[in-house]
Image: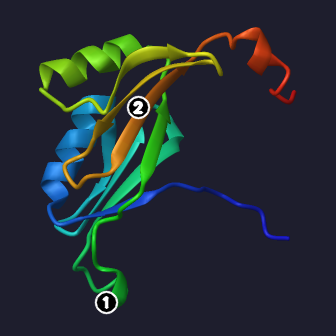
Amino acid sequence: MTAIASLYPVLMTGDVPRARAFYAQLLGLDETFASDWYVSLAAPGDGSVQLGIVANDHDSVPAAFRATAAGLLVTVEVDDVDAVHARAVAAGLPFHVPLRDEPWGQRHFITEDPDGALVDVVTPIPPAPEFAAQYLG
């Protein structure tokens, strides 16, 4: 079996600079590669946390799939969901799930990126007893 060196999402967009600005501002990601049709973002100092953004009309995208994704939920685990939420509020982002604690062990909120993908920003918290036994390891 071949070892996996990296695994990261690449979101398609009709406006690469707009999508780049959204994710960089909300999550504090840095550019690691930039062109007019593709941008790679990563968490500062951590090459293992990456996000790609590609123009949906670029030749590298098969013609039959050149649309923004529907039914997509991008989950981002952070160490301080309240700080990211404050940035989202300041940016005037919509909230489809308000900031709240969930019994399965997450404090989170769900917003939306400029292309309509849902972005679920979470910080793990201790789960309620009825969920604690479901965690493996």
Mark 1 surroundings within 10 Å by alpha-carbon count, few (fewer than 14), some (14 through 19), many (20 or more): few
Residue found farthest to the front: 130
Residue at the spot x=75%, y=20% of the render?
131
Residue at the spot x=41%, y=50% of the render?
51
Q: Is residue 96 above or below residue 13?
A: above
Residue at the spot x=37%, y=12% of the render?
82
Residue at the spot x=22%, y=48% of the render?
20
Residue 44 is labelled as 2
Q: Mark 1 and 2 residues: CB-CB less than 8 Å, in contact?
A: no
In x, y percent, where is residue 102?
55, 18
Q: Is residue 15 above or below residue 91?
A: below
Q: Is residue 19 left or right of residue 130?
A: left
What amino acid type is highlighted by mark number 2? Pro
Q: Is residue 83 left or right of residue 105?
A: left
Q: Give the residue number, with chain letter if any, for mark 1.
A: 63
| Secondary structure type for disc 2 | loop
In x, y percent, where is residue 64?
34, 88
For this rendering, which residue is in front, 126 or 12? 126
Q: Is residue 30 above or below residue 84?
A: below
